[in-house]
Image (cartoon, rainbow, N blue to C red):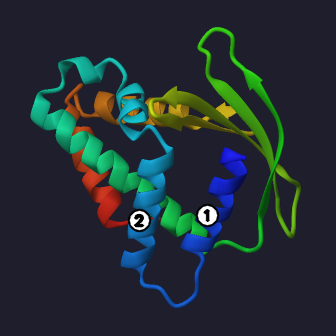
Amino acid sequence: MFIENLSEQAIAALTAPGISREEREARARTLLTANFAVPTIGQFVLGRHWRTASPEERSEYLALFEELIVVTYVDRFSRYSGERLRVTSALVDKESDDVVVYSEITRPAGAPVQVGWRVRRVPPSFKIVDVIVEGVSMGQTQRSDFASVIRSNGGALSGLLDEMRRRVRQPT
């Protein structure tokens, strides 16, 4: 029910007619922080670079990470065309105690998309820690993307922060 309810809330909040982009972003941020373990995801995505980042870099990175997710999803929901999510099963990952909720997103045109939601107990509730689209972890994909940006900037986290600032200013 958690994933289905979140899907319905997101569609209602982010596709409502007549609201400004700023309001959509505020609604997306509220849903994100209430339902996703953003600091946990952000730390995982940054990988080994988290350990060497200064407190200031960590703070800016997490703020930019959250903002990047918000603008990305506001843009994606702006192209909403009647997709529906249906949960198909859920399994406990014995190694981590996470629950992976499997779902199918049906579209008016095209084949359904298989999406898994890795959910973890983060007291006092449960939070999403990864989304797996067609078998590909979005956390792993973003981790590879960010590591590549850091590598191409001589191993400096500042290069990633610059790129994140650019992406936030110019959403897709």
Disc 2 on helix, strand or loop? loop
Q: Residue furthest top?
A: 95
Which residue is painted at 72% across and 20% down in the image? 92
Q: CA distance from mark 2 to mark 1?
A: 23 Å
Decide: few, some or many residues near mark 1? Use Cα within 10 Å; few <14, some 14-19, many ≥20.
few
Task: Identify the image quadrant of residue 149.
Answer: top left
Disc 2 marks which residue? 171
Q: Are marks 2 and 1 in contact (CB under 8 Å)?
A: no
Q: Is residue 51 left or right of residue 75?
A: left
Q: Residue furthest front?
A: 124
Asked if one can make out residue 135 in the rendered structure from this viewpoint, the answer is no
Q: Position of residue 93 (x, y in %)?
A: 69, 17
Asked if one can make out residue 82 in the rendered structure from this viewpoint, the answer is yes
The residue lying toward the viewer, choosing from 140 and 26, is: 26
Which residue is painted at 20% across and 34% down in the image? 58
Which residue is painted at 67% across and 55% down in the image? 5
Residue 157, compared with residue 97, is above or below; it is below
- Name the residue type under label 2: Pro
Which residue is painted at 62% across and 16% down in the image? 97
Disc 1 marks which residue? 9
